[in-house]
Amino acid sequence: MKPIATAEAPAAIGPYSQAYVAGGFVFCSGQIALDPKTGQMVGATAADQAAQVMKNLAAVLRGAGCELRDVVKTTIFLKSMNDFAAVNEVYARALGEHRPARATVEAARLPKDALVEIDCIARLE
């Protein structure tokens, strides 16, 4: 197993790694809309935050040696299921034609009061 850490994505805000490579897969920790340079939350809406989250996930995946097109499973955590359609649009745009398996759940509260958090599992070739 190998931990992944890249300056291109926000540093972990707790005792965990940005991602771990194990068994030919990359297991990415949940990302929220933190700016990697400042560590501050960005985006006033769930859609704005989702755009930053997808950038952060892409950066972690690049640090591990793969890309968003290698993602096989995601989990989306929303503060409000009312934001489902807006986040879905951003998510679909970021992934293009690629459609990994996915679960979406509403969470009572997310780290730093984020509106959206996404984690993923990707395949390494």
Image (cartoon, grey):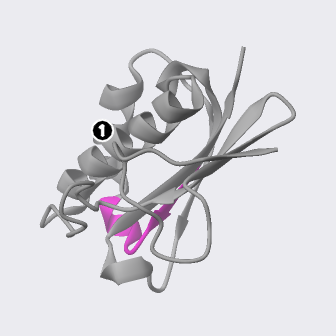
Residue 55, image x, y percentages: 32, 40
The percent coordinates of residue 83 (x first, y second) are: 31, 61
Magenta-tinted stretch = 75-83
Q: Residues within 10 Å of mark 1 (few under 14, many from 20)?
A: few
Depth check: 86 or 28 in front? 28
In the rendered image, the quadrant that contains the C terminus is: top right
Question: Which residue sits furthest bottom?
Answer: 108
Closer to us: 4 or 106: 4
Q: Residue furthest right?
A: 23
Q: Quadrant of residue 21?
A: top right
The residue positioned 49% from the left and 26% from the top of the image is: 68
Is 104 in the magenta?
Answer: no
Q: Looking at the picture, which amino acid does disc 1 mark?
A: Glu
Is 77 a magenta residue? Answer: yes
Q: Is residue 88 visible?
A: no
Q: Is residue 112 left or right of residue 2?
A: left
Residue at which label 1 appears: 89
Tell me which residue sits at (53%, 77%) in the image.
14
Left-right relation of 68 to 96: right
- For image coordinates 37% across by 56% down, the residue present is 84
Query: Residue 48: where, in percent of width, then height?
Result: 18, 53
Disc 1 secondary structure class: helix
Residue 86 visible somewhere in the drawing? yes
